[in-house]
């Protein structure tokens, strides 16, 4: 892929990444390295009650654990962040170790922000509003999809307003990420597939972003190759540590890619339908990705040749035809793992589509989409395709 001669970019990836089976044992070392004397462990009740993952991390941290906060819902909100902050402040916590999926990790980012700055979370909505690093954070993902362990973004739902708030600041990026494939083994097949499709969306959107650049492209391209092989294998063989590790590393790479290059219309749509109808974020991305690829094809033909090559799709010269083939391959890939192909199948009413299209215009991710969008009427057909399923 060629780049314009006037290309300039900044690539930022400050997180220390520790990978390996059993690497969760290094959580205490990382806490000590970051100067954490009193740790707030942030997780959720499902992990605590149905697995030993939280207890395993707390055992490693030992006497450093000042408190454990578990009231993080699957679609976390402002209230959860502020409750976590209150728990950490009361315990005198000086850092956070998060154990969970994207919702937990994003909640922990918000908690770290408030531990440093105080106040109310809504006061910090937006991008690059902080002037200093938030409280130290060691992120331990138990899903392989969001890449939140290496990104500067937290997405937190405002349940009162019915929308998702974006917090984007390099000071929010976790200090350490511990990628232990054993921490993802118990993830159910449908969540393994949905979170994997989230990572695949990150990689593809990083490549079709207006802010794409060569280092992010390299990470995204390899992540696509890894995910194409790893996600179905993890679904078929949930105990396969090598496959689990491959998906985990790929999700991390895709996270680093989009944290620099940004995402686009797929995520703008997923944020919107997730806020309005509670559709799981990874599943929403999986459903919206094929129609957006078709929509973007006229503007992203050269980029989609790279994506198609990495995903094993035969190349054709016509950009529109390539977009259709790539979209069909992505839809079939998700369907082969049992994921629904339409918003209709997950309960979104058709009469909501005009409002969803209008609300999408106000999502910050849309700014970076490879094909510019200026009016809701331009993307209503994309919503229609996502609702019905791309043929």
Image: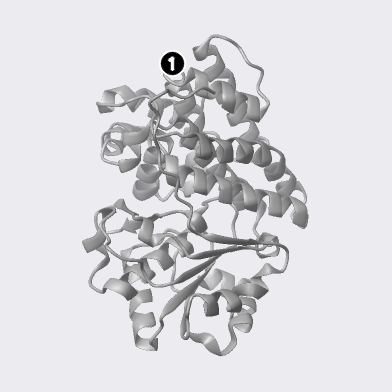
Is residue 177 among the parts visible in the rendering?
yes
Left or right: 208 in relation to 170: right
Quarter of the rendering containing residue 220 = top right
Give the residue at x 50% y 36%: 287
Q: How many numbered marks does the figure carry?
A: 1
Q: Quadrant of the C terminus?
A: top right
Q: Which colour style is shown?
A: one colour
Give the residue at x 30% y 42%: 364
Residue farthest along the bottom direction in this orientation:
63
Q: Is residue 367 above or below residue 139?
A: above
Residue 382 percent across, percent down from the top left: 40, 26
Q: Quadrant of the N terminus?
A: top right
- The residue pinned by badge 1 equals 298
Residue farthest along the front direction in this orientation:
5
Residue 320 percent across, percent down from the top left: 49, 13
Left or right: 22 in relation to 213: right
Give the residue at x 43% y 36%: 266
Disc 1, SS = loop
Residue 385 percent across, percent down from the top left: 44, 26
């Amino acid at each position: 892929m060629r780049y314009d001669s006037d290309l300039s970019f900044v690539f930022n990836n400050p997180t220390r990444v520790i990978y390996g089976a059993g690497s969760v044992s290094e959580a205490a070392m990382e806490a000590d390295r970051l100067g954490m004397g009193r740790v707030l462990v942030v997780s959720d009740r499902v992990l605590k009650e149905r697995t030993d993952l939280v207890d395993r991390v707390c055992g490693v941290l030992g006497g450093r654990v000042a408190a454990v906060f578990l009231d993080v819902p699957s679609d976390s909100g402002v209230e959860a962040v502020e409750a976590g902050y209150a728990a950490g402040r009361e315990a005198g916590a000086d850092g956070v170790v998060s154990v969970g999926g994207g919702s937990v990790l994003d909640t922990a980012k918000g908690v770290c922000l408030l531990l440093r700055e105080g106040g109310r979370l809504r006061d910090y909505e937006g991008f690059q509003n902080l002037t200093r690093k938030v409280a130290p954070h060691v992120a331990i993902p138990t899903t392989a999809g969001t890449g939140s362990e290496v990104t500067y973004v937290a997405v937190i739902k405002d349940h009162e307003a019915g929308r998702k708030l974006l917090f984007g600041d390099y000071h929010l990026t976790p200090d350490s990420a511990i990628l232990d494939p054993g921490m993802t083994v118990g993830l159910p097949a449908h969540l393994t597939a949905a979170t994997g499709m989230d990572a695949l969306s990150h990689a593809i959107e990083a490549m079709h972003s207006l802010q794409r650049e060569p280092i992010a492209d390299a990470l995204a391209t390899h992540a696509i190759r890894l995910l194409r092989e790893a996600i179905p294998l993890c679904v078929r063989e949930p105990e396969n540590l090598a496959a689990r590790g491959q998906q985990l590393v790929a999700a991390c790479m895709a996270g680093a890619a989009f944290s620099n290059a940004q995402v686009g219309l797929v995520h703008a749509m997923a944020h919107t339908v997730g806020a309005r109808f509670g559709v799981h974020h990874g599943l929403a991305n999986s459903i919206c990705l094929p129609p957006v690829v078709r929509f973007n094809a006229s503007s992203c033909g050269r980029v989609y040749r790279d994506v198609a090559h990495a995903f094993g799709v035969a190349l054709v010269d016509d950009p529109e035809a390539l977009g259709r083939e790539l979209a069909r391959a992505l839809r079939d890939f998700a369907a082969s793992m049992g994921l629904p192909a339409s918003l209709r199948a997950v309960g979104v009413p058709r009469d909501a589509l005009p409002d969803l299209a209008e609300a999408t215009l106000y999502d910050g991710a849309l700014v970076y989409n490879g094909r510019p969008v200026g009016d809701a009427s331009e993307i209503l057909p994309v919503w229609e395709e996502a609702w019905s399923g791309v043929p």
